[in-house]
Image (cartoon, grey):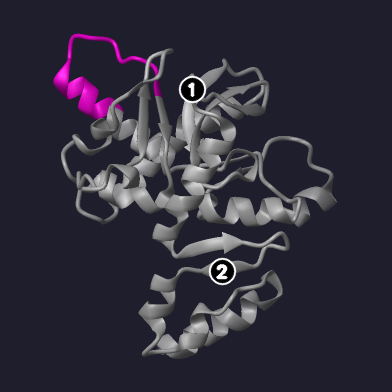
């Protein structure tokens, strides 16, 4: 993103590198991409597949998804969390009728290369909508303007804006995804981009290399990566 700024590029930038977490880190550094790709869009595809299977003769309604990368694996494997607060949120139609269970009703897919195919299918509409002269698109995708997690958006004229359902505020949507980030081990992100990990992350490495769960500052990335390599060697 620094290179984008230095090159004077003024067009949209789409980030496919763990955008639900890297987006908000970049946003803290005033380097947020225009939008992230995948994740919430993958969940949206799974919802559409469930609706198509249940009602093959009906046109799909507007689908809006609020969800985080940490929730994608459960969705892909059709494993609905027992705690409703841990489920991604699914809103149907202009009125935003909630039906979160739809995210977990498509046939399960075991982890593997097929996930990349679903990512690709979820990414293409967003990339096409960002092209000059493209028709507007209402979709769900990751990290618009560096927000944590994924949101419903409108894409038009190379710009991305939130398209939240009635009754859901931006603050509530962000708070939801910040909570869900704990599933990826992220407790919070400081204003300078330093990442603090969850207690579960600390416990996971306590018997191996406890320092791997120390707060991670941007300036320490190379050193931490080398430390991780040494532990895994």
Q: Report the residue at 73% width, 63% height from top.
A: 192
Give whichever of 227, 217 is nearer the camera.
217
Spatial separation of the CA atoms under disc 1 and disc 2: 31 Å
Graded by Cα atoms within 10 Å as few (under 14), some (14 to 19) or many (20 or more), the crowding at tag 2 reads some
Is 21 left or right of 49, judged from the image as shown?
right
Please state the extent of the stretch shown in magenta in the rendering.
48-63
Q: Report the residue at 48% width, 46% height from top.
A: 177
Within the magenta stretch, is there residue 72? no
| Mark nearer the viewer, 1 or 2 | 1
The quadrant where residue 21 appears? bottom right
Q: Report the residue at 18% width, 9% height from top.
A: 57
| Residue 201 against residue 170 in the figure, above or below | below
| Residue 138 against residue 27 in the figure, above or below | above
| Quadrant into which the C terminus falls | bottom left
Q: Report the residue at 65% width, 67% height from top.
A: 194
Q: Which residue is mark 1?
A: 167
Q: The residue tagged with tag 1: helix, strand or loop?
A: loop
Q: Which residue is mark 2?
A: 196
Q: Position of residue 187 (x, y in %)?
A: 51, 63
Is 218 left or right of 47, judged from the image as shown?
right
Is 132 left or right of 4, judged from the image as shown?
left
Q: Position of residue 121 (x, y in %)?
A: 38, 35
How many marks overall?
2
Graded by Cα atoms within 10 Å as few (under 14), some (14 to 19) or many (20 or more), the crowding at tag 1 reads few
Tell me which numbered mark, 1 or 2, is placed earlier along the sequence: 1
The quadrant where residue 135 appears? top right
Q: Position of residue 191 (x, y in %)?
A: 71, 59
Q: The residue tagged with tag 2: helix, strand or loop?
A: strand
């Amino acid at each position: 993103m620094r290179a984008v700024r230095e090159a004077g590029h003024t067009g949209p930038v789409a980030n496919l590198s763990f955008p639900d977490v890297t987006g908000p880190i970049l946003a803290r550094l005033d380097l947020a991409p225009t939008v992230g790709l995948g994740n919430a869009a993958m969940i949206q595809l799974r919802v559409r597949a469930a609706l198509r299977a249940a009602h093959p003769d009906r046109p799909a309604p507007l689908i809006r998804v609020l969800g985080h990368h940490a929730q994608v694996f459960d969705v892909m494997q059709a494993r609905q969390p027992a705690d409703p607060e841990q489920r991604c949120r699914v809103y149907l139609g202009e009125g935003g009728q909630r039906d979160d269970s739809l995210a977990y009703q498509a046939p399960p897919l075991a982890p593997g290369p097929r996930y990349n195919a679903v990512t690709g299918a979820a990414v293409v509409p967003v990339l096409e909508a960002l092209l000059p002269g493209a028709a507007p698109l209402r979709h769900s995708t990751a990290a618009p303007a560096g927000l944590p997690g994924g949101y419903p958006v409108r894409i038009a004229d190379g710009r991305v804006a939130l398209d939240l359902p009635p009754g859901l505020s931006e603050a509530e949507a962000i708070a939801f995804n910040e909570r869900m980030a704990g599933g990826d081990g992220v407790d919070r992100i400081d204003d300078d981009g330093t990442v603090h990990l969850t207690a579960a992350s600390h416990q996971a490495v306590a018997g191996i290399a406890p320092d791997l769960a120390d707060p991670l500052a941007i300036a320490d990335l190379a050193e931490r990566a080398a430390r991780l390599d040494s532990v895994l060697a």
